[in-house]
């Protein structure tokens, strides 16, 4: 997965949860999620924003990827 595209996706998630973009958090999420195709991560982020009240953890996003 391309890190630049992933950072755009993280910016969307931080905005949706009304959080300031934290580069260290974004790097950490990329470290754990980079093995998955961007489209799968994108789908998980969009679904998380719809159903999870608070900023999702890496494990919650991975659960959504594996569905």
Image (cartoon, helix red, strand yellow):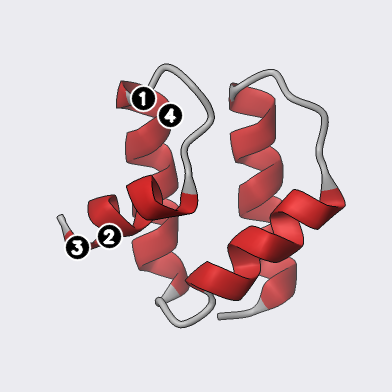
Q: CA distance from mark 1 to mark 4?
A: 6 Å
Q: Is residue 27 left or right of residue 46?
A: right
Residue topped by disc 2: 65
Q: Residues within 10 Å of mark 2 (few under 14, many from 20)?
A: some
Q: Residue visible at 73% across and 51% down?
A: 25
Q: Residue visible at 84% across and 52% down?
A: 23
Question: x and y percent of residue 31 in the render?
Answer: 62, 73
Question: x and y percent of residue 41 in the render?
Answer: 42, 60
Q: Secondary structure at mark 3?
A: helix
Residue topped by disc 1: 52
Quadrant position of residue 48: top left
Residue topped by disc 4: 49
Q: Are marks 1 and 4 in contact (CB under 8 Å)?
A: yes
Label 1 vs label 4, nearer the camera: 1
Q: Secondary structure at mark 1?
A: loop
Q: CA distance from mark 1 to mark 3?
A: 16 Å
Quadrant in the picture for the N terminus:
bottom right
Q: Residue visible at 61% across and 51% down?
A: 9
Against 53, residue 40 (above or below) is below
User: Which of disc 3 and disc 1 is earlier in sequence?
Assistant: 1
Q: CA distance from mark 4 to mark 2?
A: 14 Å
Q: Residues within 10 Å of mark 3 (few under 14, many from 20)?
A: few
Quadrant position of residue 39: bottom left
Q: Are marks 1 and 3 in contact (CB under 8 Å)?
A: no
């Amino acid at each position: 997965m391309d890190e630049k595209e992933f950072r755009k996706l993280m910016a969307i998630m931080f905005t949706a949860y009304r959080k300031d973009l934290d580069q260290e958090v974004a790097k950490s999420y990329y470290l754990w999620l980079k093995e998955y195709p961007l489209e799968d991560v994108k789908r998980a982020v969009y679904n998380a924003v719809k159903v999870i009240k608070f900023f999702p953890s890496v494990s919650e996003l991975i659960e959504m990827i594996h569905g």
